[in-house]
Amino acid sequence: MDENGNGKHEIALDKWRELYELADEIKHLAPWKVLWDTDLFIISLPQYPEPFYCSTMGKIGECMAIGVYPGSEGINSYVRMVDALKADPPFITGLAQVCTLCYFGDRQEISEQDREVYKALNLKFRGSNEWIYFRSMEPGYFPWYLNAAQVDQMVAVFRQYIEAYQYWLTLPKQDDADTDVIIKRYYSDEKAQWVNTAESVYPIEYMLSRVTITDDLFASRLKKQKVIQQSIEYDCVYMPFQVREKKSDRPIMPWILLMADRKSGIVLNQHMGSPQDSIANAVLGMLAEYINKNGRPSDIYIRDDWMANYTEDFCKKVGIKLHVKKVMHAMNRIITQLSNSAF
């Protein structure tokens, strides 16, 4: 299949075969029986500029999968998902992932495109959690099929994932809880061999550069607006429904920017965009428009550090108190209602 999931064999069959063989080996190792999804393997490959972060899912018996998160974009999306508040609607951070996933699922999860590959490789699966298939996750797009570059990437990562897991098995075992080490595997030019290390878990933080306001006159004008005693909730999320112009296109998932009164839950403004639209421009533009029309709200509540990337500098320079990682009661109700209405 190509990057749009079209055609049978645009990806060389020998590459597909190798990927499925590696995935089958992982399936028989069943690493999800002992690893939690926060037991990361960090794999550095010589041919790629950034490492890959591998998460093993399925410890509690649901959704057995290996997630491969590439570089800073990938780990940012992983950290955002792990740090999500329990009160958040579950799809919010899941739809914003940057990763490729290998699933070990059930027959009803398999598409016709998957079956084409099975047929070409003469693969047969039977039973629950036995059907191997792959998907790509990218913010703003519906989960889709791997392209040739992603297949090559998964093959290279899975070769080393298996070795990293075998190394993990040699380590002193912890209690039946999250382990306190992260496995790193890399190729040492000095030693001319692959090296494994077990390092203490440390907080993996967002690797984001804040959007800054460079127009001081613009900021000072907004700061002169009157302060209104109002707390607003401000959020931007991808919606769990697909839009597709052509059958051959990868479906998109639009994002929606919402502003609501925290006390009453009334929607104050909204804007929907596609993956090609600038979220930063929309976030700053809606805030500026609201302040020019109504005055400066005393407080703005946002969901997480991802949204802070767009709003922190703005609020500091305009003189608005920003609250990060707070439960968004009004916004959660609105988003849940919108997502339910889509089905």
Image (cartoon, helix red, strand yellow):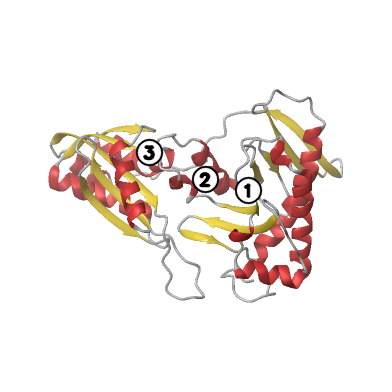
Residue 308 image offset from top left, x and y in percent: 38, 39
Q: Which residue position is annotated with label 1?
A: 67
Q: Which residue position is annotated with label 2?
A: 77
- The quarter of the rendered structure image containing the N terminus is bottom right
Is residue 176 placed above or below 268 in the rendered structure? above
Residue 284 image offset from top left, x and y in percent: 30, 49
Distance from disc 2 to disc 3, alpha carbons, whole Å, reads 14 Å
For the residue labelled by badge 2, is the local secondary structure a helix, a strand or a loop? helix
Marks 2 and 3 in Cβ contact (< 8 Å)? no
Residue 2 seen in the current view: yes
Marks 1 and 2 in Cβ contact (< 8 Å)? no
User: Which mark is on residue 303?
Assistant: 3
- The quarter of the rendered structure image containing the C terminus is bottom left
Residue type indicated by callout 1: Gly
Residue type indicated by callout 2: Ser
Nearer to us in this view, 21 or 255: 21
Residue 46 seen in the current view: no
User: Which mark is on residue 76?
Assistant: none
Residue type indicated by callout 3: Arg
Marks 1 and 3 in Cβ contact (< 8 Å)? no
Q: Residue at x 82, y 45 (%)?
A: 189
Q: Residue at x 66, y 59 (%)?
A: 133
